[in-house]
């Protein structure tokens, strides 16, 4: 079901599901969504594997120079398609509560107009510390943003799971996310990040708490988690599950 739903979503989805023998879901909350629409569904629950086709991490200083970022800052990254439910405005609010040692990098294509965010940035006391790349970020550019980032921030108002987290894992970037969907289980169970309430003050406090600790602790947990999230392991699980299904053409 879309994050910005229409009245026809559920009936059309149910019609489509009736044509399917099996399902692959990547979080408990998506499993619950599936079973709410199709209670008898056969499914495989398996976490999303890493996105590992974006190249390798480069030196932070080189990435900052390439992106023309101010040096000597703690770099926060908002990455991905910019949609209302992703809460970018909450993160911009949070920047007003963070001191001058923090810098926000916004990198992603707006789903609609970026004007309201731009006005919010211009009115923010942190406007000089917010760098905007409001455009499509090609695969060949992704490594620069994650190489420059110290922390990925996902200030979502709602979510099921996040496709950005596997990218962050690939580049060994810790994550702070709001406590929506399956993000708590995704981050806190393996110790690869933290969650906080979905409001500007809580996001700012969460960011400060992560930097007050040792980010290397999160990075070491990410390295362990990466071992369980290979595409080979995922492919074996899916093909093994598919072999158990009946009436597959």
Image: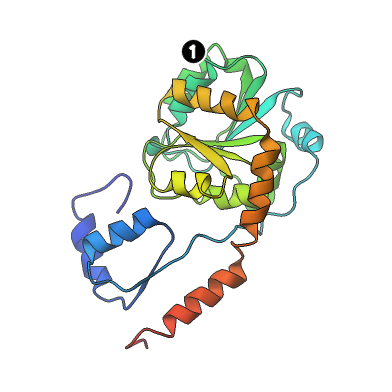
Q: Quadrant of residue 132?
A: top right
Q: Measured from the top left, where is residue 81 in percent x and y?
A: 49, 43
Does residue 104 sit above or below 188 in this rendering? Answer: above
Residue 229 visible at all: yes
The quadrant of the rendering that contains the C terminus is bottom left
Front position in the image: 121 or 155:
155
Does residue 212 sit above or below 215 in this rendering? Answer: above
Q: Measured from the top left, where is residue 194 in percent x and y?
A: 52, 37
Q: Measured from the top left, where is residue 172 in percent x and y?
A: 67, 47
Residue pointed to by mark 1:
123
Residue 149 visible at all: no
Image label count: 1
Q: Quadrant of residue 1?
A: bottom left
Q: Secondary structure at mark 1?
A: helix
Q: Viewed as shown, does residue 220 lie left or right of 62?
A: left
At a point 36% along the width and 40% down the height, the residue shown is 158
At a point 40% along the width and 30% down the height, the residue shown is 198
Front position in the image: 213 or 241:
213
At a point 71% along the width and 23% down the height, the residue shown is 73
Judge the density around disc 1: few (<14), some (14-19), many (≥20) Cα neighbours within 10 Å.
Answer: few
């Amino acid at each position: 079901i879309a994050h910005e739903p229409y009245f026809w979503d559920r009936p059309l989805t149910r019609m489509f599901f009736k044509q399917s023998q099996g399902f692959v879901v990547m979080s408990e909350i998506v499993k619950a969504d599936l079973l709410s629409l199709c209670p008898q569904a056969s499914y495989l629950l398996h976490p999303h594997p890493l996105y590992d086709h974006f190249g390798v991490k480069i030196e932070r200083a080189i990435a900052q120079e390439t992106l023309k970022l101010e040096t000597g800052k703690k770099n926060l990254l908002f990455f991905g398609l910019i949609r209302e439910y992703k809460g970018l405005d909450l993160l911009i609010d949070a920047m007003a509560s963070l001191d001058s040692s923090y810098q926000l990098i916004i990198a992603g294509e707006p789903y609609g107009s970026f004007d309201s965010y731009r006005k919010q940035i211009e009115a923010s006391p942190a406007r000089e510390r917010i760098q905007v790349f409001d455009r499509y970020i090609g695969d060949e550019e992704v490594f620069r943003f994650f190489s420059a980032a110290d922390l990925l921030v996902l200030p979502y108002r709602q979510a099921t799971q996040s496709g950005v987290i596997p990218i962050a894992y690939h580049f060994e970037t810790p994550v702070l996310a709001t406590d929506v969907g399956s993000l708590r289980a995704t981050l806190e169970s393996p110790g690869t990040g933290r969650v906080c309430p979905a409001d500007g003050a809580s996001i700012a406090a969460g960011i400060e708490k992560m930097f007050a600790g040792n980010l290397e602790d999160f990075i070491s947990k990410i390295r362990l988690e990466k071992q369980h999230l290979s595409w080979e392991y995922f492919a074996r699980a899916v093909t093994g599950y598919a072999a158990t299904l009946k009436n597959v053409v």
